[in-house]
Amino acid sequence: MESKIAKTPLLVVSLAFCWITNLSGCSIAQLQHDDLQEPAQRRSGNVNLEPKATGFTGGRVGWGRVTLFSIPVVPIHIHSDEASDLMVVVRDALAIAGYAAHFVDNAQPGPVLKAHVDEVRFNNYTWVVPLVPTWGRLHVTLRLESADGPVLWEKSFEGSGHTYNFTDGYNIAATRIVTKLANSMVEAFGSQEFSNALSEGG
């Protein structure tokens, strides 16, 4: 007797398999980084940080997709407090550059470093299972603002990354993206430009 699976159209089987694949790894647990590289020039001093980044919506950051036509089927979310996670990444980058970073409230006198997320986007394709290309992009702008409002220093950073991991693609891609982003921040924090801006606002 012919099995029910044998009677099922190949496309339906493929879609079901891709759906299960997405459900097994369709979220990002936390924004975190791997080991960071030290800058060419280490600095010293204190930097005040806003506790949360702006720009995250708290909703989806991408889609898991199926079929050759890349049909979006599963929304992708970051399940931690991504606004706080990103500021921890900024704090870590400052520490590698030599600074002592402190989270402060809005009433804190002196310059404060703030982060705004301009874009965050993740996608994958499952129609080439067991290879599952997963990739993303994170674009962030940092601003060092003086206590009375003027921007002392501003710079945009972009991190991108991808993986073909079958079961944990989004977490792996996200970590690679954040690591690239953080290393770019370390380099910027080690610059004379940032040091001068910090001294000007102090």
Image (spheres, rainbow, N blue to C red):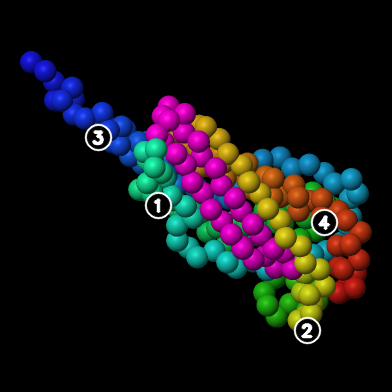
Residue 148 figure quarter: bottom right
Residues tagged 2 and 1 counted as in contact (Cβ below 8 A)? no
Residues tagged 1 and 4 counted as in contact (Cβ below 8 A)? no
Of all residues, the one furthest to the left in this rendering is 1
N-terminal of the pair, mark 1 or mark 4, is 1
Q: Residue at x 36, y 38 (%)?
A: 67
Q: Is residue 29 left or right of residue 98?
A: left
Q: Which residue is mark 4?
A: 189
Q: Residue at x 56, y 47 (%)?
A: 136
Do we see residue 56 in this rendering?
yes
Instruction: Give the residue type at disc 4.
Output: Phe
Marks 2 and 1, Cα distance to the nearest angstrom?
41 Å
N-terminal of the pair, mark 4 or mark 3, is 3
Secondary structure beneath dot 3 equals helix
Quadrant of the image containing the N terminus:
top left
Q: Which residue is mark 1?
A: 75
N-terminal of the pair, mark 2 or mark 4, is 2
Instruction: Give the residue type at disc 3.
Output: Val
Of all residues, the one furthest to the bottom in this rendering is 148
Secondary structure beneath dot 4 equals helix
Q: Which residue is mark 2?
A: 148
Residue 86 at x, y = what percent? 63, 57
Residue 196 at x, y = what percent? 91, 66
Boundaries of the magenta span: 114-143
Q: Which residue is mark 3?
A: 12
Instruction: Give the residue type at disc 2.
Output: Asp
Marks 1 and 4, Cα distance to the nearest angstrom?
35 Å
Marks 3 and 1, Cα distance to the nearest angstrom?
21 Å
Residue 47 figure quarter: bottom right
Q: Vertically, is 83 above or below 145?
A: above
> Is 171 included in the stretch rendered in magenta?
no
Judged by its main secondary structure, the magenta piece is strand
